[in-house]
Amino acid sequence: MLSEASRQKIELLKARYRQPQAVVLAALWMWQDEHGWVSEEGLREVADLLGLPYHHVYGVVTFYTMYNKEPVGRHKIEVCTNVSCMLRNSDRILDHIRKRLEINVGETTPDNRFTLVEAECLGACGGAPAMQIGDEYHENLDPAAVDRILNELK
């Protein structure tokens, strides 16, 4: 269930935009911020709060990659594997993280600290290879830089 503070924010957004569809992204983000991922319960609660059909909210959460559709670790590591990053050895970065954390893409470490995923594009082509952890972007990566970043997160 969403907190009262989030429910109040949603009501303010509904009044501001007057169209409940305009609030779906924010409401889902609030749910994920509070619960770590968007569960079936979250989908239903957001649909009910906004007065929208369940399938509309489901369509939104499955379209956008920013929503976690299953539980993830405390730190979700997204490594860009699109063309610019791939040309600058993002595969090497991904392999390094896999070996370092002893998990494969799509898996979470046993202590639930890290989840590793491939990102289609992080929009950081000028700083390739890049990864995103939470809200932070990291660019111009090499294995040593990745190790420093991961050490700071432990």
Image (spheres, helix red, strand yellow):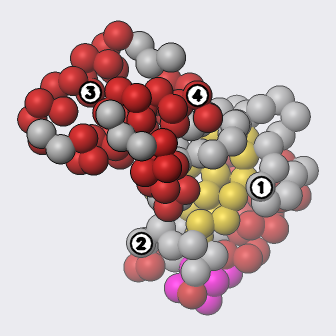
Quarter location, residue 150: top right
Residue 148 on image: x %, y %: 65, 48
Q: Earlier in the sequence, mark 4 or mark 3?
A: 3
Residue 114 on image: x %, y %: 72, 41
Q: Which residues are magenta?
A: 84-89
User: Are the two marked residues, 1 and 4, in contact with CB atoms closer than 8 angstroms?
Assistant: no
Residue drawn at x 72%, y 53% is: 116
Give the Cα separation between the discs numbered 3 and 1: 31 Å
Label 3 is placed on what type of residue? Ile
User: Are the two marked residues, 3 and 1, in contact with CB atoms closer than 8 angstroms?
Assistant: no
Label 1 is placed on what type of residue? Gly
Determine whether the residue tagged by mark 1 lies in a helix, strand or loop: loop
In the current view of this chain or complex, which residue is farthest to the top?
A: 4
Label 2 is placed on what type of residue? Gly
Q: Earlier in the sequence, mark 3 or mark 1?
A: 3
Residue 91 on image: x %, y %: 73, 76
Give the Cα separation between the discs numbered 1 and 4: 22 Å
Label 4 is placed on what type of residue? Glu
Residue 147 visible at all: yes
Q: Which mark is residue 41?
A: 4
User: Are the two marked residues, 2 and 4, in contact with CB atoms closer than 8 angstroms?
Assistant: no
Q: Is residue 138 above or below residue 152?
A: below
Determine whether the residue tagged by mark 2 lies in a helix, strand or loop: loop
Residue hosting label 2:
123
Q: Nearer the viewer, mark 2 or mark 4?
A: 4
Q: Is residue 85 magenta?
A: yes
